[in-house]
Image: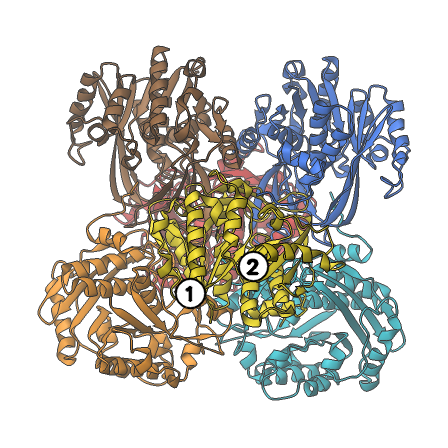
Chain colours: A blue, B yellow, C cyan, D orange, E red, F brown
């Protein structure tokens, strides 16, 4: 069994009930959320061996995060507990013409202020086979960026597979470096890359683009995008590209492409008309992708499973992919919401 | 006024809130549910005279079921209370590509273990005009099957109209008989039959089938299905066939056909794009069908009302058809969700 | 800054949770609601200077209304507190084929029974620039009608701009006058008129009509309707006409037209497929219309903003337009529910 | 089995959650309540045969009351449905030094405006053995007072046992008669009287009083009070007197006395330190008293059961005595909150 | 009418439901809280003219605070909105042997980081008569301390009455000064001082102490404490001393003393056995004290009202004194939780 | 660090909200519960190494139990998953004179029907130091009794410390053996015994008893009880005896005694006047006892900590001891509900 490690921030997500606007009624729903943590939990629920590494405060909030991760089968023994605060975000669900609204209150969290020397990557990764990171962690702070690069470099040196999900939160990049410079450095250590159609340009500064709605009419339009990445970073072996078309806050369609240097596979388009919770959809895709890649290798079945995992998440409240492998496989195989009794 | 009697199991339904997965948050919503009980409650809410017959435990769960049935105007005086347990089921609502999930915990309920001699059908049916049963009750246990056949036979002998809603829960048939053999025995006593397009094959072993999506383009395609039933069981006089097309967990369309030996009427197609709760939709159809058949006889108005009742249920939380005759008639007459102030 | 005054009834709205039928579970959600109050709150949330004038009971219900209005920045200092009751209404959300249901319990409220002399309009309007009223207030009672006409007349005499939103609640007109007679009297004082395509006939007894679905194919079809109003009441300078097509309780499309004596502008059509709460949609349109008219004058931008405000409301629980000017402007400018992080 | 009939008002009770002040958060909890209805439901839950007679509105509120009464086994077939409104009351629970607060909105309810001729008492009471009324019903309106006296007089003439629970809501008496005059008229028809130590003076204008805290030290102090009633109304045969000492909104003690013309029995004192809901405590006492009087006759067991029923209610949310005979008997026999597993 | 101004921090308080431990179930209840804000709201609910001055973030959290303050009649026009965050605190209610637990997340809030020059005290206080502050505000940060002293000094110079509630949160004092030094500086500007029996020592470094439980047996024991303050700061004219005895998390008793240089008055002891929410109890006392002092002057009635206000708060969820003057006066006059119908 | 193993049943507990009666409103609160599981979770929350061994169903209910145990740091890897059902129980909180009510629905659970050979105790206990069991597990079924004795015997043979908490659920013993015979067999393997004052007689058939309320006046009265156990089972080395006095459903006092063959220590009496949730109080005591015994040995500190753990539980919703060691130690050291900020 592949043994995963992830580094990132996990926040407390405080959501207004139902379709209410923030603080419309005086209640908030508490869940946990974070790009890498979402992947860790998704894999944990598939009974994979996954360690989530972060820094958490020594208080009830940190303990609650610890409990939540253990609950989903994620190993938390490599995480550092220290004085400080937990990052928070407040969110309201969108509907129709009203988009989701997120208010971050994540500055100065433990992971943003952690001393990079708190993590001895040689030791932390000694029993691990795979390291996963996203483009959000290095955005948090300069020290978090330092931790990210240390971990990736060490993982690569130790022979772990390194995967990275590009993910740009432009508002977070506030410590005075250009995000493209950091992302390009990160790419040096990556084996498996995940990104949406816009990330290659916005994160990596590449030039290849795709016209809207091309995916099934003209999948080959995505080839130059992949080729440009492969050409620039010879270490990258596999790329997954996600494609999303937003109709309204309730309705979007998603699809994905798996590209190697030689081949390309395209998932079906998943039409999602009554979105329950779209946050974490990209992380769910990555969860399904890592899992299926490990189980099935590069093939149609893998991108179908990844696409189904991403689509399935849109029907589940919270950031986490609370679904079984069997449920996702059924969707990948063509089921569409029929009840089972 | 027609006086109805029904035999069946009523369970406690424990549902996760909103679109949550089961046990995602630590709350369950309690309602009551059961194929014949749903019909009894629907008729009770139309102010019909209906007795629901079952076996219930002598404890707070049995008392709660009793209270709930009385609340909706259903007579519960013919029900037996004894030691034992109430059947339960846990359920989460589906959404988009994620189907409804039901976890049954109904084994060994009072009604499954009841001694058939607990019911003196001659006496229980003495003041009744109509007996209704579904294909689920005989699946529960061998004794429940025995009760079913006793009741149907007695009802037939006493001159009651007997209706049966075919309804296959394959997972329940575990006491060692073939369900087709039981269903064929039941058919001997039936005057009015309800089933969906698949039931005639799966429950009764008949051969006529209908291609998908034929209903309005080619309604005559359903004729052979009805004819095969009429040919095999001369006692059956009226058949209602329901047709359902599932697009996603939120979206389906329904329609229905009423067939006599000579004629056939087809309801409009009801397009339901934002399903609130689909469980009990079939029972709501049967409720509307029995009610309208009694009130209007075999005619277009009857199948329209039945179809509207079934469609309306999809917009109401819980298994029960909590709607008035006027609301359903308005839908049957073509209203479509416009508000009334 | 324009200083608004409004006269009307504000009620307590008691709603069944989610999609439940009234009293299905024993909980009601409390918000406040009323045609003019909804506009007052919407403008208050845009930081406009707005006074809401009504009569409220001297008890916890009246105090709660006062608190709610202050909360949204509405001045309540001109309101009268007296013995009596607050109007209530009970409501359940519709879904699919099941329409919204409203049960009014508003008879004999303080505002229905208020003595017209309780309001000294000369004084109340002395520091105001604009007076707004709807067609509901004069329907409440004969004295409320008297207050309405007094206020409009005084406002007109004092040189305030007077706007009126036609709005017919036929069931309320029970004190023995013909609503058309009252509405025609009111029109004598109006500068800015708002109504939907049916109101001109039903409220004012005019003859011009528009065939369904004409709005973008043939906008000029609306010209005669406006012309008839302009011809009959020379004081009316601007008319906004809203157009609504209802597909189901969850789905409708809206658009609007702004007409002067010389020109006409048409908003985009807003397709709303997953309505959260449609009540107050018309009032939200009027809010946006008054605000934009004052800020931008008669132009395309104004009707687009008004249309967007009305559409946006359908995604927000409660009667109030809890949205910022920026959010509505973004929708008017073409955003469609994409999330912002 | 004794067959009871009761006349009175049943209201919808809208309560703030937990210990919140009214409208502190935007939710209300819905239950039903009314002095005679509380007794009817209590008896219905003991499986007694009880008819509740009132006038209810023909709308969702009236239907909900009907459903709630049926749920608890109360016959509602003698109730009149008509146009109008249901009485409401808003309530917040007290705590410590903060008392319960009730805001009535019950004016002009159906029962307040009902035409006395709507009730044909000869027919309504034909199959009944016992008629029960309280001092609240005649306070509602002049016509309600008329109905009360008609019903009592007819009941007496037909040989039913007539019981009356004195209960003064001074704020309700607004139609211009003196409540003492009405209560004295009512007394002419009463066989069994219930009242607290203050009612004999405040309702009936009698002179006997009892010093505080006398009950167990000096029970004979209550004898003159009973004697004065017995002397004035020879038809009255049994009196139950309840005694309450309030320490705080959470804490009170209760006890009761049963007096005949010859004898007197005193219940234990029930110390209630953590009151859950005190409303309906007096009605629960009356429920227990009527039930035990019928079952056990005049004896110690009867007043103990009645006292226990009243005390038990303080631990149950809502106005109704949701408890079994066995639970109350256990308390009457000396159990004190020990758990049973 | 006295016109008040207050400076301080207002936080969002996030509470676990009922008696649950933090994050035991995934819901938090949102209210607002802060020592001076609690007083401002209490006075606002008594219809006093009160301005609350702080710095709030320009986001949904800041807007929600603004709305909440306006709701209770507090003027918010003098408050500064800027980039930054709102202070938060998480709390669980205690019970029995388990104390309340508070987890602060208030570092780096807008008010902690505000530039003192953002407040032009001359202008802000120009239309005010009274300035109130607590010992918590200067603890937040050095700049907050600077604002506190600026405001007090200006207020004093402008002839406002200055009141101060001593209140030590030792954990907050982290910017490197001794709190006693700051508090002693503040005392130079104070007219009216509020503190509990321990504050004079812990905040001001005075030496007079009182043995436990002395208050009514030996009220003169408190005289030296007051005298020591009066001697040291000749500007201080009135002191209120609160006394609290904690039995358990549910049970405490409170009393208070009002001292001038010549006289002393003692409130009754309020025994609170079923505490609903003790947070804000001290601020409620101060609210009652400021209000009554202004209305009644130095006298027994004033300290009784203040004590009753503090006691009453313990029965109300949230930090705010949501009570009317009449309710508090009734308690001050000796009522004890009896219901009023 | 001591490594614990426990065998037992864990059930889903379904509780009515607040103080409601079962099914009064249609919501149930879900937690997990079981005598040994409660101890396992308590130790897990103290960061102890504890394995809980049981049989769970392969469905969402079994998965939820697994997640809940992991959440609290309990190892679940030794548990068996199989077809079958999870035991349930329904519960309502008591108040005042109304006791807690429990309705079990636990028959035929996985652990009741498990084949004893499913557990290879040699292997399961190989890495464990301590085995804990209660008197409930052998009551479940004959096979569960078999598993219990197998585990205890193996543990004893392998040199683990064996602890047993006597705990009689008379209603469960239905498979035809005398519980005293089973309990006496179990005693052969026990090192550390826990029981309340009644268990020694009811479970073990011993004769020594203690008069009520003796504990602090006359602690030596408990000596003969301990001596009788020590005399009969030479293997038993330590006994903890809990003493409980119930005043009402809200109020009880608890204390405990630790006895060795030579010495005896008595805890303080904990008076609990506002019980939040008493279920699991005994298991919390055992949790504290095992933990402190291991950490501090036989001494006063141990029995104080154990008593404090038991008392603390009464203030926490659910069966689990959700408290930190520090919180319990503070109570053991004399803190009494004072808040900490």
Chain assignment, label 2: B
| Number of residues whose C-alpha sits closer than 10 Å to that of mark 1, classed few (under 14), some (14–19) or many (20 or more) | many
Q: Is residue A178 above or below residue D224?
A: above
Q: Is residue B39 above or below residue C54?
A: above
| Number of residues whose C-alpha sits closer than 10 Å to that of mark 2, classed few (under 14), some (14–19) or many (20 or more) | few
Closer to the camera, F155 or E159?
Answer: F155
Q: Are marks 1 and 2 in contact (CB under 8 Å)?
A: no
Q: Is residue D276 left or right of residue C122?
A: left
SS category of the residue bearing label 2 = loop
Q: Is residue A174 left or right of residue E105?
A: right
Q: Position of residue C136 (x, y in %)?
A: 65, 77
The residue that label 2 is drawn on is B234
What label sits on residue B128 in the rendered view?
Answer: 1
Residue at the location (65% across, 25% down)?
Answer: A114
Residue at the location (70% across, 71% down)?
Answer: C4
The part of the image, by quadrant, that contains residue C306 is: bottom right
SS category of the residue bearing label 1 = loop
Q: Is residue D206 above or below residue F196?
A: below
Q: Is residue D139 above or below residue E187?
A: below
Q: Quadrant of the C terminus of chain C?
A: top right
Closer to the camera, C179 or B164?
Answer: B164
Closer to the camera, F316 or D217?
Answer: F316
Residue C39 makes an appearance in the image: yes
Kindly give the residue lying farthest to the left in the view shown: D262
Q: CA distance from mark 1 to mark 2?
A: 24 Å
Q: Position of residue E305 (x, y in %)?
A: 39, 59
Q: Earlier in the sequence, mark 1 or mark 2?
A: 1
The part of the image, by quadrant, that contains residue D214 is: bottom left
Q: Is residue D132 left or right of residue A138?
A: left
């Amino acid at each position: 069994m592949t043994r995963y490690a992830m580094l990132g921030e996990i926040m407390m997500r405080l959501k207004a009930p139902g379709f209410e606007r923030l603080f419309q009624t005086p209640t908030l729903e508490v869940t946990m959320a974070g790009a890498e943590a979402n992947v860790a939990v998704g894999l944990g629920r598939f009974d994979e061996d996954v360690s989530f590494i972060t820094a958490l405060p020594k208080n009830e909030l940190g303990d609650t995060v610890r409990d939540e991760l253990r609950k989903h089968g994620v190993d938390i023994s490599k995480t550092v507990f220290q004085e400080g605060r937990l990052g928070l975000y407040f969110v309201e669900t969108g509907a129709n013409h009203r988009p989701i609204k997120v208010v971050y209150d994540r500055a100065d969290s433990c992971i943003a202020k952690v001393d990079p020397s708190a993590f001895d990557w040689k030791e932390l990764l000694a029993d691990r086979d795979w390291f996963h990171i996203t483009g959000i962690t290095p955005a948090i702070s300069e020290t978090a960026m330092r931790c990210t690069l240390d971990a990736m470099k060490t993982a690569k040196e130790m022979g772990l597979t390194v995967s990275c999900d590009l993910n740009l939160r432009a508002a977070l990049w506030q410590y005075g470096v250009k995000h493209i410079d950091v992302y390009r450095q990160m790419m040096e250590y990556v084996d498996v890359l995940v990104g949406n159609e816009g990330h290659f340009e916005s994160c990596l500064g590449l030039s290849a683009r795709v016209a809207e709605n091309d995916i099934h009419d003209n999948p080959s339009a995505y080839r130059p995008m992949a080729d440009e990445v492969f050409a620039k970073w010879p270490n990258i072996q596999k790329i997954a590209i996600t494609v999303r078309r937003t109709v309204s806050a309730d309705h979007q369609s998603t699809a994905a492409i798996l590209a190697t240097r030689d081949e390309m596979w395209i998932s079906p388009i998943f039409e999602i008309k009554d979105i329950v919770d779209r946050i974490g959809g990209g992380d769910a895709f990555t969860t399904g992708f890592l899992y299926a890649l490990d189980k099935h290798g590069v093939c149609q079945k893998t991108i179908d499973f990844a696409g189904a995992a991403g689509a399935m998440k849109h029907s589940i409240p919270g950031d986490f992919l609370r679904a079984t492998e069997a449920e996702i496989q059924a969707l990948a195989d063509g089921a569409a919401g029929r009840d089972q009794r």
